[in-house]
Image: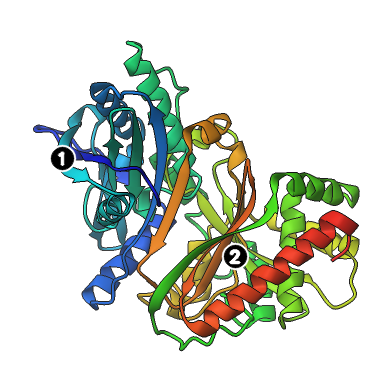
């Protein structure tokens, strides 16, 4: 993070007097997240994390309009007004009515340098906590000629695609209020309604349910629900290390257009080509000839949840061969078949699979005991307000205090394709990560330039 000096203000969410709290239902993701946080805190083994977003407003900023926009945002999304209670048999939540939420301004003082702004925001951002309401903090760094608007969330109330949703909502609401208008954003879906639907669909899921057959086959081939990241990171199982957080540009915007063409020529799409390239790059670095990975996928769809805040993420298993000498077209055909099969089973929630098929791991107070092989990709150019991302200098920020794993995700923006990674920052892990960066970049550019790996 690098921002110009300015006055750091926060608008802190508070519950108004006399509020009513209708009961709500939590999602499977929230229930697992909350229980892990509780158990880790009880064991004094808790790691702080956050996901945040920032964007710029030009010109002298109307502070009253900005405060109104931030209040509009937290009133618009029920998940931001939720409080959680661990009960026998599961996690429950109450939801403050929109009119019973207010924002109180807090002055954090003047930050006199970019590093001072960064440090002040980092301290505020890391204050979000899944066990303490509210799980979002909002504010701005205000100057005479501009402002950097910010918000930071715990994962319980937001996912990666929630960040552009929040930027869009706040920016559009601010423009309306500053112009004397009422914001006219389209009605958005309720994360609590989504949670109800998810639980209703899976109320009868049991360990012998045929909907779990695909997962059982994946576990048989992998040896575990969680496929290990196959490259040597030099990490001790169960040990936490100081986290490294890096972002690497893999392809320019123009090169991404070339990759689109190459993928289309073999009957595929960009996300398929990226998945294939990652599998082949890992193979080149000494990985197996069958790439087995877990793939987070969005549960938002194109309906009302497309513009909602929440944790709309399911996780699905993917396996495909990447043996030496296989052509791009052959690997893509297997990737496409694996993805087609995956979409037939998308309604099965990963957390329930975890609970039913790996109960020992499910009961642990860490998410997983070793570095898991993930493939995650999203294209922020398809998110609400994407046409203004460059103009607003919109940015997402993900941070973790420590790591015992190697996690990376690919993001496509208007300027290209990026690999963002949070991983255990040991010398060996950094060496492995740098080597994979280079191999993946070369593999992708070979595809763009020659249509081969």
Query: In x, y percent, where is residue 335?
Result: 78, 61
Q: In this view, does 183 lie above or below 101?
A: above
Q: How crowded is mark 2: few (under 14 residues within 10 Å), some or many (20 or more)?
A: few
Residue at the image position 19 percent from the left and 43 percent from the top: 110
**Image quarter for residue 431?**
bottom right
Q: Is mark 2 on a helix, strand or loop?
A: loop
Residue at the image position 25 percent from the left and 52 percent from the top: 120
Query: In x, y percent, where is residue 119?
Result: 28, 56
Query: In x, y percent, where is residue 345?
Result: 65, 56
**Image quarter for residue 224?**
bottom right
Q: In this view, does 328 lie above or below 384?
A: below
Residue at the image position 42 percent from the left and 40 percent from the top: 309
Residue found at the very far top of the displayed protein? 180
Q: Can residue 271 be seen in this view?
A: yes
Q: Nearer the viewer, residue 141 or 86?
A: 141
> What residue does disc 1 label?
107
Q: Is residue 271 above or below residue 141?
A: below
Left or right: 443 with respect to 38?
right
Q: Can residue 189 be seen in this view?
A: no
**Image quarter for residue 316?**
bottom right
Q: Mark on residue 331? A: none
Q: Which of 256 and 329 is in front in this view?
A: 256
Q: Is tag 1's residue or tag 2's residue first in the polypeptide sequence?
A: 1
């Amino acid at each position: 993070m690098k921002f110009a000096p300015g006055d750091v203000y926060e608008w802190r969410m508070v519950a108004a007097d006399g509020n009513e709290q209708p009961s709500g239902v939590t999602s499977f993701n929230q229930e697992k997240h909350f229980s892990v946080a509780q158990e880790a805190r009880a064991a004094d083994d808790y790691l702080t994390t956050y996901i945040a977003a920032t964007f710029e407003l030009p010109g002298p900023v109307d502070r009253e309009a900005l405060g109104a926009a931030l209040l509009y945002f937290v009133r618009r999304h029920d998940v931001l007004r939720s409080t959680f209670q661990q009960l026998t048999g599961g996690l429950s939540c109450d939801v403050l009515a929109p009119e019973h939420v207010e924002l109180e301004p807090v002055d954090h003082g003047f930050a006199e340098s970019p590093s001072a702004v960064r440090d002040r925001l980092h301290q505020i951002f890391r204050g979000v906590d899944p066990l303490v309401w509210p799980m979002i903090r909002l504010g701005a760094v205000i100057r005479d000629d501009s402002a950097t608007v910010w918000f930071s969330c715990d994962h319980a109330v937001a996912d990666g695609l929630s960040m552009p949703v929040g930027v869009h909502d706040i920016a559009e609401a601010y423009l309306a209020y500053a112009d004397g208008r009422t914001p006219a954003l389209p009605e958005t879906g309720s994360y609590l309604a989504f949670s109800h639907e998810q639980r209703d669909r899976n109320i009868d899921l049991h360990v012998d349910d045929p909907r779990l057959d695909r997962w059982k086959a994946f576990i048989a081939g992998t040896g575990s629900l969680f496929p290990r990241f196959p490259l040597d990171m030099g990490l001790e199982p169960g040990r936490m290390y100081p986290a490294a957080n890096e972002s690497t540009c893999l392809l320019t915007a123009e090169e991404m257009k070339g990759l689109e063409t190459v993928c289309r020529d073999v009957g595929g799409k960009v996300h398929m080509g990226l998945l294939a390239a990652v599998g082949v790059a890992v193979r080149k670095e000494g990985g197996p000839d069958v790439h087995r990975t877990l793939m987070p996928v969005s549960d938002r769809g194109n309906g009302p949840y497309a513009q909602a805040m929440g944790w709309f993420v399911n996780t699905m298993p993917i396996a495909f061969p990447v043996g030496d000498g296989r052509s791009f077209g052959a690997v893509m055909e297997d990737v496409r078949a694996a993805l087609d099969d995956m979409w037939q089973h998308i309604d099965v929630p990963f957390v329930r699979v975890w609970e039913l098929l790996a109960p020992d791991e499910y009961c642990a107070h860490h998410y997983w005991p070793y570095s898991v092989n993930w493939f995650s990709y999203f294209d922020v150019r398809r998110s609400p307000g994407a046409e203004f991302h460059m103009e607003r200098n919109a940015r997402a920020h993900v941070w973790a205090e420590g790591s015992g794993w190697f996690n990376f995700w690919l993001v496509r923006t208007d300027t290209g394709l990026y690999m963002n990674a949070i991983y255990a920052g040991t010398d060996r892990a950094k060496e492995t990560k740098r080597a994979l960066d280079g191999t993946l970049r070369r593999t992708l550019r070979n595809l763009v330039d020659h249509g081969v790996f």
